[in-house]
């Protein structure tokens, strides 16, 4: 198939481009700048076409939409922990841009749209753990609100125009290529600071529980949705297991074979105490399940850093 990956140069996008090319699809990568995190092998692949554009301008993106069958929408211009600082910009860059993606999909008769949402923020403070797709959605950060808003617009476009849209509510991905100096991603940040013998900074007392999924498992879930022909449209994608930040520190200590210094900071009011996703629906309908344990994932990432 001819497949467009919006956000192709990012962490997830670069892995998805690799996987789609390996499956012999023709891939169009849309991003504001190239090459980003794309590997040279994919850039040089004759089945890959880079397309420089910004989704905030529909006239820039319409031509490439007319050339493809399937669209993956991965691009996002904000982070969970900073989105509350400027919700107006969060709305402007993410909702308006995503509406352009939906409009371009409608005008171009796209066969399938796959949107990566946020399993870590759209549900808010959980009433039941693990969290299923039917759990109430009450996000407590602007990032989660905008992700959920886009989900609702996808539903609207399905209802009004028959757009075949699918939503993946993703946990916390990690793996090689993830920036170690970024403000996003607990695992790469912890590993980098641990290797550099810097204190690991934890918000609260370390009891916060998160669901971490290795990037290769997330990529395989995205491919599973591409093959899926059923009627379900929303899937959680995570490890199905939770780990506290203190337990994560302990695993890194075992990996590095030394004790680490931890600095405890004030709790942030937008951090939910626990987030673990139920992946039963993805298992039963997509035939997908994660294969990389947190211990193996940490080892894989560590080997790429040292």
Image (spheres, helix red, strand yellow):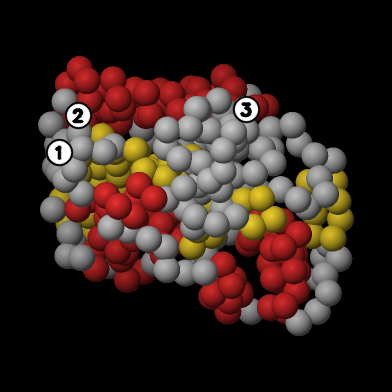
- For marks 3 and 2, the one nearer the N-term is 3
Disc on res. 140 = 3
Question: Label 3's element?
Answer: loop
The Cα–Cα distance between marks 2 and 1, rounded to whole angstroms, is: 8 Å
Residue at disc 1, secondary structure: loop
- Quadrant position of residue 241: bottom right
CA gap between label 3 and label 2 equals 29 Å
**How crowded is the residue under tag 2: few (<14 C-alpha within 10 Å), some, or many (20+)?**
many
Residue name at image x 62 percent, y 27 percent:
140
Q: Earlier in the sequence, mark 2 or mark 1?
A: 1
Residue 48 percent location from the top left of the image = 23, 59
Q: Could you say which is closer to the camera, residue 265 or residue 283?
A: 283
Instruction: Report whether residue 49 is seen.
Output: no
Residue at 68% from the left image edge and 59% from the top image edge:
189
Distance between the Cα atoms at labels 3 and 1? 33 Å
Residue 218's label in the rendered image is: none
Q: Residue furthest bottom?
A: 257
Regarding residue 209, the answer to whether it shows in the image is yes
Q: Mark 2 points at which residue?
A: 163
Q: Quarter of the image for the C terminus: give it.
A: bottom right
- Dot 3: within a 10 Å radius of its alpha carbon, few (fewer than 14), some, or many (20 or more) residues? some
Q: Are marks 2 and 1 in contact (CB under 8 Å)?
A: no
Check contact, mark 3 vs mark 2: CB within 8 A. Answer: no
Quadrant of res 248:
bottom right
Horizontal arrangement in the rendering, residue 125 relative to residue 50 (left or right): right
Identify whether 199 is placed above or below 100.
below
Q: Is residue 67 left or right of residue 212?
A: left
User: In screen coordinates, is 202 left or right of 294?
Assistant: right
Circle 1 residue: 111
């Amino acid at each position: 198939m001819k497949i467009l990956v919006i956000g192709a140069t990012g962490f997830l996008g670069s892995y998805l481009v690799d996987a789609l090319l390996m499956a012999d699809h023709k891939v169009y990568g849309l991003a504001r700048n190239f090459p980003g995190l794309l590997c040279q092998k994919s850039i040089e692949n004759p089945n890959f076409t880079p397309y420089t554009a910004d989704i905030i301008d529909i006239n820039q993106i319409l031509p490439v939409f007319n050339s493809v069958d399937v669209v993956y929408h991965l691009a996002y211009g904000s982070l969970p922990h900073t989105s509350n600082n400027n919700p107006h910009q969060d709305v402007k860059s993410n909702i308006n841009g995503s509406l352009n993606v939906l409009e371009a999909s409608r005008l171009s008769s796209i066969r399938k749209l796959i949107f990566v949402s946020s399993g870590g923020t759209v549900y808010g403070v959980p009433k039941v753990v693990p969290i299923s797709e039917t759990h109430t959605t009450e996000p407590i950060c602007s990032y989660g609100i905008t992700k959920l808003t886009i989900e609702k617009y996808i539903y609207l476009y399905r209802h009004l125009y028959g757009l075949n849209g699918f939503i993946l509510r993703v946990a916390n991905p990690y793996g090689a290529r993830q920036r170690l100096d970024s403000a996003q991603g607990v695992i790469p940040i912890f590993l980098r600071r641990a290797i550099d013998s810097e204190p690991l900074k934890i918000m609260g007392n370390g009891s916060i529980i998160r669901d971490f999924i290795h990037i290769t498992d997330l990529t395989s879930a995205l491919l599973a949705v591409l093959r899926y022909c059923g009627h379900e449209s929303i899937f959680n994608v995570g490890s199905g297991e939770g780990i506290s930040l203190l337990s994560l520190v302990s695993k890194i200590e075992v990996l590095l074979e030394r004790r680490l210094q931890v600095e405890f900071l004030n709790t942030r009011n937008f951090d939910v105490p626990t987030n673990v996703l139920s992946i039963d629906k993805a298992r039963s309908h997509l035939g997908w399940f994660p294969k990389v344990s947190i211990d193996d994932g940490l080892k894989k990432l560590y080997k790429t850093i040292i």
